[in-house]
Amino acid sequence: MRFLFLSMIIAAAAASALSLSNVCTDSNVQSSLAPITINGITIDSNSVVATPVYNYTVSDSDNYPGASGLSFCNVTLSYSHNGISDNVLLWYWLPAQSQFENRFLATGGGGYNINSGSSGLAGGIIYGAVTGLTDGGFGGFDVSLEEVILKANGTLNYEALFAFGYKAIHEMTEIGTALTKNYYNTSKTYTYYQGCSEGGREGWSQVQRHGDQYDGAVIGAPAFRQAFQQVNHLFSGVVEATLDYAPSPCELEKINNDTIAACDSLDGKVDGVVSRTDLCKLHYNVTASVGKNYSCAASTGFGGSTPAASGIVTAEAAAVANAILAGLHDSKGRQVYVSYQSSADFEDAQTTYNTTSGQYYATASGLGAAYIQQFLYELNATTMSIDGITYDTLRGWMLEGMQKFADTLQTVWPDLETFHAHGGKVLHYHGESDPSIPTSSSVIYQDAVRRTMYPGLGFNESFAQLDDWYRLFLIPGAAHCAPNAEQPNGPFPQQTLKTVIDWVEKGVNPKVLNGTVLQGEEYGRHEDICSFPLRPSWHGENSTVQCVYDQVSLDTWFPDLNSIPLPVYADP
Ligand SMILES: *[C@@H]1O[C@H](CO)[C@@H](O)[C@H](O)[C@H]1NC(C)=O
Ligand SMILES: *[C@@H]1O[C@H](CO)[C@@H](O)[C@H](O)[C@H]1NC(C)=O
Ligand SMILES: *[C@@H]1O[C@H](CO)[C@@H](O)[C@H](O)[C@H]1NC(C)=O
Ligand SMILES: *[C@@H]1O[C@H](CO)[C@@H](O)[C@H](O)[C@H]1NC(C)=O
Ligand SMILES: *[C@@H]1O[C@H](CO)[C@@H](O)[C@H](O)[C@H]1NC(C)=O
Ligand SMILES: *[C@@H]1O[C@H](CO)[C@@H](O)[C@H](O)[C@H]1NC(C)=O
Ligand SMILES: *[C@@H]1O[C@H](CO)[C@@H](O)[C@H](O)[C@H]1NC(C)=O
Ligand SMILES: *[C@@H]1O[C@H](CO)[C@@H](O)[C@H](O)[C@H]1NC(C)=O
Ligand SMILES: *[C@@H]1O[C@H](CO)[C@@H](O)[C@H](O)[C@H]1NC(C)=O
Ligand SMILES: *[C@@H]1O[C@H](CO)[C@@H](O)[C@H](O)[C@H]1NC(C)=O
Ligand SMILES: *[C@@H]1O[C@H](CO)[C@@H](O)[C@H](O)[C@H]1NC(C)=O
Ligand SMILES: *[C@@H]1O[C@H](CO)[C@@H](O)[C@H](O)[C@H]1NC(C)=O
Ligand SMILES: [Ca+2]
């Protein structure tokens, strides 16, 4: 009896293993693809490679919890666009039938990469979702847009630009959801998107243009409004050049450390986390660091090696920091764009050490320079001199890029009616101490959506509507798409996709986001994260977070961007 029972279990295990090896074949995947017809696209049936993967382990990441015992069909294939001889590679993981939960997940990339490889795929397979990515047609899963954006100097690769802008992920989702329906013989599949940074921009590209294709999206710190975003990377260096003061990285680190220490308690809880950068902006001035000692050991980092540094924080360094925090203003004093929040690292302001002169000098941020050279000037170069670049130059580049890339890289279309009518839910998050993409860049986009979708309603009334389907969460202390080593006790939302799945499939509206400390002494501690416009506040020792309405704080998130007399911060 006992033996019989055991052999039944073994037989059942064998059957499920068998079923994956039965269905995960080139020919079965080819038959699932055969009925798919998409205007303008030819799927190359011969390109299909399907291999079963058993007992796969996903390790814990910032964006999803780990899992083990996963089995799936690992599929790659390619397709081409009719009329041009291109070749786009697709990569899907299709869960074993027993682990499939009627979901499809599209994933995006980061930087100028259009995918995040298997670390992106792992984020969906743990939730029983067929998960996919694309190479954009760039010539391989690890080939970035930067490598193909120029066909020659002066000749932009528009196929690649539009593929990156929005087309490739849309097509990957179209083919992937159809493949899912045929492969599992299921009629209803929920479709999701997950990505951060460029992956966040890619997510918005889908929600804005293909709103009826997605049921839910997790979008982190999106690199959208890219004409502004990329040029803004140059702003800190231009401040240093304009004010003729190039602080050592150590001097700026000291200013930031002092900022974190001074603003920590403004949220009501002394934990090393500046959960209220808005109060920091209102009540703290970095001039408080002037005259304080700083010292750093020698280090090897991004721009080469930096020698040991020590000194006393100067008024010039504080002026540089204040100008950066104030955001780009033109020569007439009008504000052009937003900046990082107080307590974010001065990453773009990193100066370089000249070993001959023994002095630091300002440089053009690599991210900004590569964009200007390749995308605006169409030159095969990734560096540029900061000499002669003024605040007005930056403004001009922003305007130029806005026109040039309005329909590809800007990705700030504020009318989400199609997505909303389809019943879509979007969870948008952004680290409040992000040093690479200004946190308020997300805030002003959500505001543009709110005003566009609910033109007749007041602030609170429109938020009450928006909260049903689009929530923005600012993550206390968090850096760019990740927890922040400088504020280790801050929470991070590790289960965002699960939160959106529950919102879409069970109607659980996330009034607060599930945050967890993912590093340091408090590892594993839970903390709720407030939904904007409500802001976190603590009263009394060991109290839990209160999400409060604070008008004075809110006003700091909506500066008067009056330099450009067009609705440029959301596409008209
Ligand atoms: C699955 O993997 C785990 C560790 O990764 C291992 O302990 C276990 O024996 C494996 N199970 C099977 C059925 O291969
Ligand atoms: C899936 O297939 C791809 C492409 O053939 C391969 O590079 C990758 O290692 C495979 N992944 C797994 C988990 O087996
Ligand atoms: C750009 O320059 C690199 C070397 O710096 C070269 O490998 C590449 O082929 C060039 N690309 C174009 C389009 O000229
Ligand atoms: C697919 O599902 C439908 C309805 O559930 C069923 O009638 C049909 O036989 C199934 N087809 C296959 C090939 O399993
Ligand atoms: C800033 O604080 C960090 C700890 O968070 C410390 O390691 C570093 O030395 C400090 N830097 C300066 C310049 O004080
Ligand atoms: C900080 O203080 C300096 C010096 O008093 C002043 O010039 C500057 O306007 C202040 N900045 C802010 C943001 O309050
Ligand atoms: C700064 O450092 C110098 C030399 O190391 C020391 O003499 C001075 O007292 C320090 N000043 C402060 C404000 O700590
Ligand atoms: C470094 O300093 C030397 C000596 O002052 C100068 O000649 C050289 O141009 C500097 N190099 C850079 C990259 O600024
Ligand atoms: C393209 O432009 C880069 C940057 O100006 C230059 O270094 C390179 O020589 C140019 N290539 C050709 C083929 O003209
Ligand atoms: C919005 O509601 C809050 C209470 O939740 C209230 O204090 C605030 O005045 C309202 N704001 C506006 C603009 O009506
Ligand atoms: C919140 O996230 C943590 C970390 O991923 C997880 O352990 C916990 O179960 C989640 N809580 C809820 C209520 O979903
Ligand atoms: C807060 O928590 C600490 C550590 O758990 C404990 O020692 C302290 O008594 C608590 N304070 C209050 C007011 O509960
Ligand atoms: Ca705090």
Image (tube, rainbow, N blue to C red):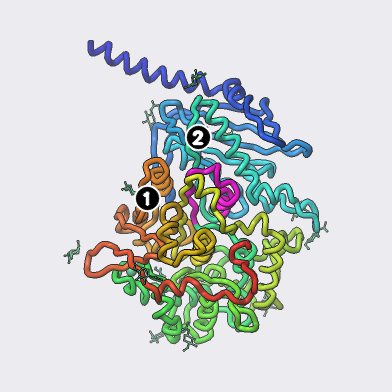
Give the x, y percent position of residue 329.
Answer: 60, 78
Reading the chain from its start, which is encountered first: label 1 or label 2? 2
Q: For this rendering, which residue is in front, 335 or 378?
A: 335
Q: Which residues are magenta?
A: 201-220
Residue 190 drawn above or below residue 13: below
Q: Residue at x 78, y 37 (%)?
A: 83
Residue 334 horizontal side relative to residue 280, left or right: right
**Picture quarter containing residue 82?**
top right
What residue would you read off at disc 2?
Answer: 130
Q: For this rendering, which residue is in front, 357 or 287?
A: 287
Question: Around disc 2, counting alpha carbons within 10 Å, would you say few (fewer than 14), some (14 to 19), or many (20 or more)?
Answer: many
**Mark 1 residue's CB less than 8 Å from ligand 11:** no
**Amino acid type, callout 2:** Val
Q: CA distance from mark 1 to mark 2?
A: 24 Å
Label 1 with label 2: CB-CB less than 8 Å = no
Q: Residue at x 54, y 53 (%)?
A: 416
Q: For this rendering, which residue is in front, 92 or 412?
A: 412
Q: Residue at x 63, y 79 (%)?
A: 330
Q: For this rendering, which residue is in front, 488 or 22?
A: 22
The answer to whether residue 495 of the structure is visible from this angle is: yes
In what element is the residue under mark 1?
loop
Q: Residue at x 63, y 29 (%)?
A: 36
Image quarter for ligand 12? bottom left
Residue 413 drawn above or below residue 53: below
The answer to whether residue 360 of the structure is visible from this angle is: no
Give the x, y percent position of residue 179.
Answer: 57, 30
**Picture quarter containing residue 386?**
bottom right
What residue would you read off at disc 1?
Answer: 509
